[in-house]
Amino acid sequence: AAAAAAAARPHRPRTSSPPNSPSRRAREHSVIIVKDNYKPKTSEAKTFVACVKNDVADMPYEIACSLMKPKDMLHVLCIYSSDLDVGGQVGKIREKYEADMEGRGLPNCAMTMLSDKPGVTVVDMINEFAIEKDADFVVVVPSADATTLSSNCEALIKHAKTNLVICKK
């Protein structure tokens, strides 16, 4: 009877994430954009850049972690407004991601905090950083309250020098 019940159940591929976890939902709702002139490395470790806004909006980080293989590299990038450090917010953001990376045992990870620069767009800063780190994929998520892609996501789609992973919550 147990064998018949098992045979009647639909096959579900094994995943490392529980069925309703945020990282699994994000993977299932992500779009990967591969630029014609920027193919990801095929046989060597890949480099991901996860662009996060703060210590709460961590979906790009979760998506990158769910896509990574053991030898891959992850750079968590937070571009913050220069007035954000009032009250130690920058330190709080850095501590959250560094503690999580350590807790997950991710050896090839780094957290980078960049203050915005007058006259330089966020998209240009992301592109510069991704090129500097030789990123294979940049992972971004529009704001949770956005009904369409944010202007930064749209600009990245048009002007990114690397491949993108975009997820809409």
Image: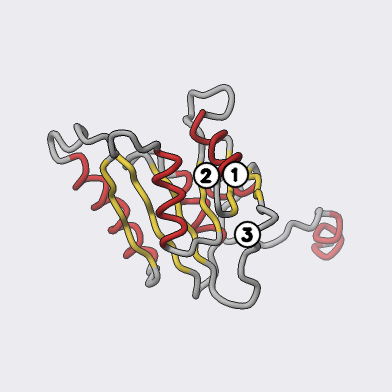
Viewport quadrant of the C terminus: top right
What residue lies at 32% left-to-right and 65% top-to-bottom?
Answer: 102
What residue lies at 48% left-to-right and 23% top-to-bottom?
Answer: 145
* Local SS, label 3: loop
Q: Along the horizontal axis of the image, is 85 left or right of 104?
A: left
The type of residue carrying mark 1 is Arg
Mark earlier in primary sequence (2, 3): 2
Q: Which is more toward the observer, 153 or 89?
A: 153
**Residue at the bottom extreme?**
43
What residue lies at 61% left-to-right and 70% top-to-bottom?
Answer: 41
The numbered dot on residue 38 is 3
Q: Please identify the quarter of the rendering in which residue 116 is found.
A: top left
The type of residue carrying mark 2 is Pro
Q: Along the horizontal axis of the image, is 117 left or right of 159?
A: left
125 above or below 17?
Answer: above
Q: Are marks 3 and 1 in contact (CB under 8 Å)?
A: no
What residue lies at 55% left-to-right and 47% top-to-bottom?
Answer: 160
* Local SS, label 2: helix
The numbered dot on residue 75 is none
Task: Work out how far the residue at label 1 is from the one at label 2, CA to CA, in angstroms.
Answer: 5 Å
Q: Which residue is mark 2?
A: 22
Task: Work out how far the residue at label 3 is from the one at label 1, CA to CA, in angstroms.
Answer: 27 Å
> Looking at the picture, how far across and down is residue 67, in whole percent?
57, 59
> Looking at the picture, how far across and down is residue 75, in whole percent?
40, 59
Crowd rating for badge 1 (residues with CA inside 10 Å; few <14, some 14–19, many 20+): some
Q: Which residue is mark 1?
A: 25
Crowd rating for badge 3 (residues with CA inside 10 Å; few <14, some 14–19, many 20+): few
